[in-house]
Image (spheres, rainbow, N blue to C red):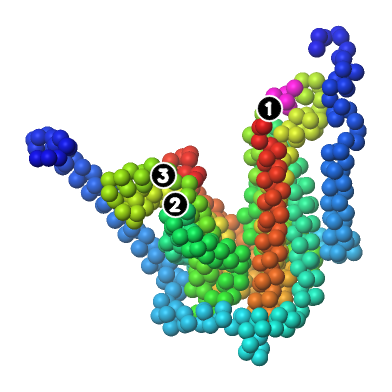
Amino acid sequence: MGSPVVSLPPAQLQPLLAAYDASVRTRRLHTLLVLGCMVVAMAAASASAEVSLSRLIENIDRFPSYIVRLFHLENGQPVWTDVAEWFWGLRRWLRLLGETLLMAYVGTFLGAVGAFGLAFLAAANVAPSPWLRIAVRRFCELCRTVPLLVFALVFVIAFGLGPLGGVLAVLIHTLGALGKQCAEVVENIDMKPVEGVASTGARWHVAMRYGALPQVMSNFVSYTLLRFEINVRESAVMGFVGAGGIGQDLIEAIRKFYYSDVSAILVLILITVALIDTTTSRIRHHLIGMEAPS
Amino acid sequence: MIPGQSPDVDGLRQRYPGHFSPFGRERLIQLLVAVAAVVVLLFGMAQLDFFSGKLAAGIGRLVEIADLMLPPDPGSWAHARTFAIALVQTIAIAFLGTLFAAVLALPVAMLAARNVTAARIVRFLSRRSLDTIRSVDILVWALIWVNVVGLGPFAGALAIMTADIGSFGKLFSEAMEAADRKPVEGILSTGGSHALGIRFGILPEVFPVLVSQVLYYFESNTRSASIIGIVGAGGIGLHLAEAIRTLELQQTSFIILLILVAVAVIDFISNRLRFAVIGPRGGTP
């Protein structure tokens, strides 16, 4: 034999091979079991969700044709042949888009200010009272688990149709989500500066201001910017339930089959979101860069 | 500094002039940014009716509404049953949407990952399409699918699937790019093909990460599935929107409570499964 690999004698090799086969067999059995459970769950879920493959296959051609129709004007021409006609409502849409951005901005700003305060009450290492801490935690949990649109639906009844309900919904959700994230940031700080300030006889809020805040500020701002990106997307659909912003024109266009309007509004939203994303991620990287030890 | 002795303030001032001047350049810029931010805030609040008396009136009404919401009550057993069935449907939508999105996103993610697909143009195209899918909101996808397969939960499951293909495609491709290169090199060195390298070098390493991300999304998709009913795509959202519009406030709070419980349960289960797959810590790509 020319092989450089030295083989074990068969007597020694046999039990090893057998053990290997056995371990492979148990693993395969395990995988099969998991797959079996998945298939059962899928069948049950499909029955509940009225999944019908035949309906899907029968109508699947409507999906591409819908997308194609989005990019055609009323007169059957593709949209790019007459951009002025495509964006006929540009002035109104830009105003609504501005309103959407303002909703996201005001909601994020006010929510973030509230969340910064709550974070110090909810963080295990600096919280002034354990009861308050638990109460604040539960409150944040409630604020971020109830979907944003549900808040919007309720607020629209209380505040009437219009952006005010939408802003408040964004605000509440931001309060919950940022409150949790910021509390986690505070829990990870170095406690020595806080103890140092407290040891000079400073009161709690002073210790937080000079001991904790400088350590967490850049992280807070970074999370807030991230939340702002999310809130811009959310504010864009707030109009679906009558809570202001560009969503109200979008859903009207979809419901009434104004195809080219749908694509025009979607394009505007996509551009805005992309612009906001690149800008905020620039700022965030700048902040993180400042944070990194030089 | 020795106790009882005053610090050398003049020396400090000389060494750190920035800390002593009240308005350094940096401070001035910070101040300007803060002022601009507050001005935009006030402008926004004025534009959005914060100061028109609508706010105060609304808060009064909100308190009234919150009062009417308690205690949560489905109204009747028949209603409770309808809501429970709708809740199961919601979870089914989230489950199917997440699962199919994961299955379909895997090949797309491979096309978008640098260490799997060599052709730059393929990578670029698959990434841009994933970006586009991701930037369209799930409610818009739901409305599009309602046009294709009609009203009902099937459209909802398809909407969640579509929206998640975008997110999973990005997350999966990033996980693959973060995978260790050495197993692949080992397989290639024994004469294995590129495909074998991906199958035995990359997939086993990233699989637990992918599973953990999918489980993580299951929880957030349950929340999404509970609102897509607002646009007619099945699940409990339909009942929720109806209860709110007809001012059945006790039913509303009952449904919200159901959603919260369901999300908490799913969160608990998926966390358990996640830890079983990846171990209590780690699993971050």
The N terminus of chain A appears in which quarter of the rendering? top left
The dot on residue B181 is: 3
Residue bearing mark 1: A191
In the image, residue A13 above or below residue B232:
above
Q: Residue A258: x, y in percent? A: 67, 83
Residue B251 visible in the displayed image = no
| Disc 2: CA contacts within 10 A as few (<14), some (14-19) or many (>=20) | some
Residue at x 53% of width, y 69% of height:
B159
What span is colored magenta in the figure?
A: A192-196
SS majority, magenta: helix
Q: Cβ–Cβ below 8 Å for labels 2 and 1? A: no
- Give the residue at mark 2: B115
Of callouts 2 and 3, the N-terminal one: 2
Q: What element carries label 2?
A: loop
Task: Reply above or below: B264 against B76.
Answer: above
Q: In the drawing, what numbered circle is on residue A173? A: none
Badge 1: residue crowd in 10 Å (few <14, some 14–19, many ≥20) = some
Callout 2 touching callout 3 (CB < 8 Å):
yes
Q: Which amino acid does label 3 sit on?
A: Arg
Q: How far apart are marks 2 and 3 (CA)?
A: 8 Å
> Badge 2 sits on which subunit?
B
Q: Disc 2 marks which amino acid?
A: Asn
Where does the image place residue A206, in percent across and percent down from the top left? 81, 30
